[in-house]
Image (spheres, rainbow, N blue to C red):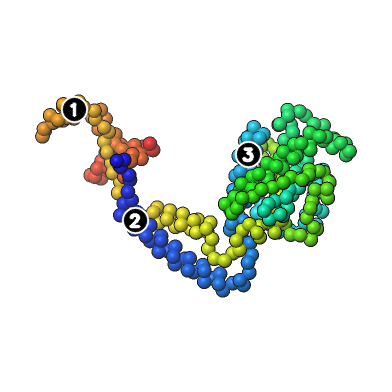
């Protein structure tokens, strides 16, 4: 049977201490939330986790799409009114509308023109003109590329939400005129986030608008500690307690190879040759972690760590 590493008594004590602390803190959190206003607001912690995962997915998929290392940074989502958002959009942005299921709500992806232009350059190797006519602002290739990028954005968003449920979506139009793709009312609330994508020395922007109704149906209301908070708390608490606990560290000299018959013939007083008697290994649970050099300091045997294995 394969041997398994077991926790030391010190580690067990640390975990038990973390468990007790978890129970005390959970009770305190529940009491604090009970004293609140009792409103069923959208869980901001869960929302933050979704957008963090979303950014990670975007980095990976855009790096593959553009064949360049892409770094993604996004501002935390904020609730805004659709009508006010539309006023801030640039006339050269291009927009794609989506319907999200099963909540039957809506999402909108807006791509800034410079981001679209650079994406086309990387995808097709062409060089677009600096000044593009209003009527044929970037042609059919612009629409195709915009839809491709927008679908990728919504796909990443859908993947980021999957822990809360399976999300499907339909693309209904990509157009430069936002009124042709926006199915939300001007008074509707949306979660808005600006996403900055950087590759080489360029930084472009994509904006994502998701109906507040979508999140209200997807994420459970804030009613006490949720699964994400519970896992985050345990991870941090156990790590903190284990890192502060004491462990037994061992030191071993290097291995010596001898024939089996010579090993069985060893007797008191025999000497085994070691090529470098100062070389030792610092071990934790019999696992070699560092290389060291044995010596003396202030009359005591010591080991100086020289490298990590």
Name the image quarter holding residue 255. top left
Task: Identify the residue at horizontal 51%, vertical 67% (top origin).
Answer: 29
Q: Find disc 3 in the rendering and name its residue.
A: 61
Label 2 crowd (10 A; few <14 / some 14-19 / many >=20): some
Task: Identify the residue at horizontal 71%, vertical 31% (top origin).
Answer: 123
Is 126 or 172 nearer to us in this picture?
172
Tell me if residue 151 comes above or below residue 214 in the rendering: above
Mark 3 and mark 1: Cα distance apart in space: 56 Å
Q: Residue furthest bottom?
A: 35
Locate residue 257, reporting x and y percent. Answer: 24, 28
| Residue 102 appears anywhere in the view | yes
Name the image quarter holding residue 9. bottom left
Tell me if residue 92 comes above or below residue 13 in the rendering: above
Sequence order check, earlier mark of 2 and 3: 2
Task: Identify the residue at horizontal 61%, vertical 43% (top origin).
Answer: 57
Q: Find disc 1 in the rendering and name its residue.
A: 260
Mark 2 and mark 3: Cα distance apart in space: 41 Å
Q: Are marks 3 and 1 in contact (CB under 8 Å)?
A: no
Secondary element at image label 3: helix
Locate residue 143, reporting x and y percent. Answer: 79, 38
Q: Find disc 2 in the rendering and name its residue.
A: 12
Q: Residue furthest front?
A: 102
Tell me if residue 291 comes above or below residue 179 in the rendering: above
Which quarter of the rendering shows the C terminus? top left
Name the image quarter holding residue 303. top left
Sequence order check, earlier mark of 3 and 1: 3
Locate residue 65, reporting x and y percent. Answer: 66, 35
Secondary element at image label 2: helix
Q: Are marks 2 and 1 in contact (CB under 8 Å)?
A: no
Task: Identify the residue at horizontal 58%, vertical 58% (top origin).
Answer: 45
Label 3 crowd (10 A; few <14 / some 14-19 / many >=20): some
């Amino acid at each position: 049977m394969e041997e398994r590493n077991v926790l030391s008594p010190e580690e067990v004590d640390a975990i038990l201490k973390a468990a007790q602390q978890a129970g005390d803190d959970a009770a305190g959190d529940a009491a604090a939330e009970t004293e609140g206003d009792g409103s069923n607001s959208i869980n901001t912690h869960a929302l933050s986790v979704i957008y963090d995962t979303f950014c990670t997915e975007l980095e990976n998929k855009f790096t593959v799409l553009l064949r360049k290392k892409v770094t993604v940074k996004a501002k935390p989502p904020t609730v805004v009114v659709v009508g006010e958002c539309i006023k801030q959009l640039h006339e050269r942005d291009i927009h794609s509308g989506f319907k999200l299921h099963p909540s039957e709500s809506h999402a909108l992806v807006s791509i800034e023109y410079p981001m679209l232009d650079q994406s086309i350059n990387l995808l097709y190797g062409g060089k677009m003109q600096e000044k593009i006519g209003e009527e044929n602002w970037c042609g059919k290739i612009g629409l195709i590329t915009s839809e491709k990028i927008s679908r990728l954005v919504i796909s990443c968003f859908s993947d980021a939400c999957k822990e809360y449920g399976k999300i499907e979506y339909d693309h209904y139009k990509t157009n430069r005129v936002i009124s042709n793709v926006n199915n939300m009312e001007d008074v509707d609330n949306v979660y808005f986030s600006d996403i900055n994508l950087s590759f080489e020395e360029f930084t472009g922007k994509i904006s994502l608008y998701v109906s507040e109704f979508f999140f209200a149906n997807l994420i459970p209301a804030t009613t006490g500690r949720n699964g994400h908070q519970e896992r985050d708390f345990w991870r941090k608490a156990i790590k903190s307690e284990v890192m502060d606990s004491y462990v037994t560290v061992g030191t071993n000299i290097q291995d010596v190879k001898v024939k089996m018959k010579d090993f069985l013939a060893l007797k008191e007083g025999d000497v085994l040759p070691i090529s470098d008697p100062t070389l030792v290994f610092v071990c934790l649970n019999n696992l070699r972690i560092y290389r060291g050099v044995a010596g003396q300091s202030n009359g005591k045997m010591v080991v100086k760590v020289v490298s990590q294995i």
